Image: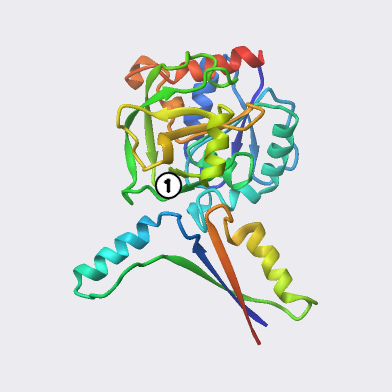
Amino acid sequence: MAATVVLVPGLNRDRDMIAALELISGTRPQTVWATDTELPATDLIVIPGGFSYGDYLRCGAIAARLPVMRAVSDAAGRGVPVLGVCNGFQILIECGLLPGALMRNASLRFVCRKVQLEVVNATSLFTSGYSAGDIINCPVAHHDGNYFAEPDELAALEDRGGIAFRYANGTNPNGSVNDIAGITNPAGNVLGLMPHPENLIEPLHGGTDGRALFEGALRQVA
Amino acid sequence: MKARVIVTLKNGVLDPQGKAIEGALSSMGHGGVEQVRQGKVFDIELDASAADPKAKVEAMCEALLANTVIETYSIELQD
């Protein structure tokens, strides 16, 4: 299993993501840099969290226009699984791989806490390690995670089972419409989510609820 | 040639920052404010090479400066 982690100036959760992928898959992921125009052969592409380009203009906007993201978009179009966490989710939205927009948290505050997520659709590649209706713990740490989509787009997203995770039990930390925490593209091979499953994979983290996301995806691509 | 691009949130898109500014104005005693919407201004200096500068700036707005899911933009060209 060859995973590839995308590195962009300003991302800072890449080490956590690389550690999680290595721990769970047993293989150290490869990395690609912002200016790379081609990706190595890969079974899984991951864009970690952070503050690419200082969140200038809009979160993820500048990173989404990098050469490496053209290569990621091409790979996603060929069906390669792509996971974006936090700023990675914002980048996937800005480059058009996922619909909608992520706006400033309704509270205007940076939120850093544990939330609960409901697994809404467990049939996608990245959620196959869970069962629909599972409630899991997951940490969030962001300032701009307030998901928005036009009513038509939102209805289409709900109808096609594009909601992977919702904030559960009143823990929506950012004002996201319909409590949306993570969404997939129509083909199901691209997942973006604001919470950080890579930070809840071993008992020392205080729980292992994030582990099944990686285990499920790795089983599918193995 | 200079172009000024103004990017604002579409009507109907919640603007929590605008709301906070609105609240601050009112708490400072500036009455009569019904609503504040926050936006962005970009001043762009262009060289003389563009045959159609407006179209050129429009392409920039669509490609990067505005997120047309939530924002609209207007362009003013100045000599």
| Residue B53, quarter of the rendered image | bottom right
Determine crowd level at label 1: few under 14, some 14-19, many 20+ residues with C-alpha closer than 10 A: many
Q: Which residue position holds label 1?
A: A144
Task: Name the residue nearer the viewer: A78 or A159.
Answer: A159
Q: Percent position (x, y) of residue A161?
A: 56, 26
Which residue is located at x 50 percent, y 24 percent?
A19
Chain letter for mark 1: A
Asked if residue A212 is positioned above or below residue B20 in the image, the reply reads above
Which residue is located at x 60 percent, y 12 percent?
A219
* Residue that lies at the very extreme toward the bottom in this rendered image: B79
Asked if residue B77 is positioned above or below residue A80 in the image, the reply reads below
Q: Percent position (x, y) of residue B17?
A: 36, 59
Q: Quadrant of the C terminus of chain A?
A: top right
Element at label 1: loop
Task: Name the residue nearer the viewer: A18 or A212.
Answer: A212
Q: Percent position (x, y) of residue A220?
A: 63, 14
Amino acid marked by disc 1: Asp
Left or right: A142 in relation to A163: left
Left or right: A133 in relation to A161: left
Left or right: B24 in relation to B38: left
Q: Quadrant of the N terminus of chain A?
A: top right
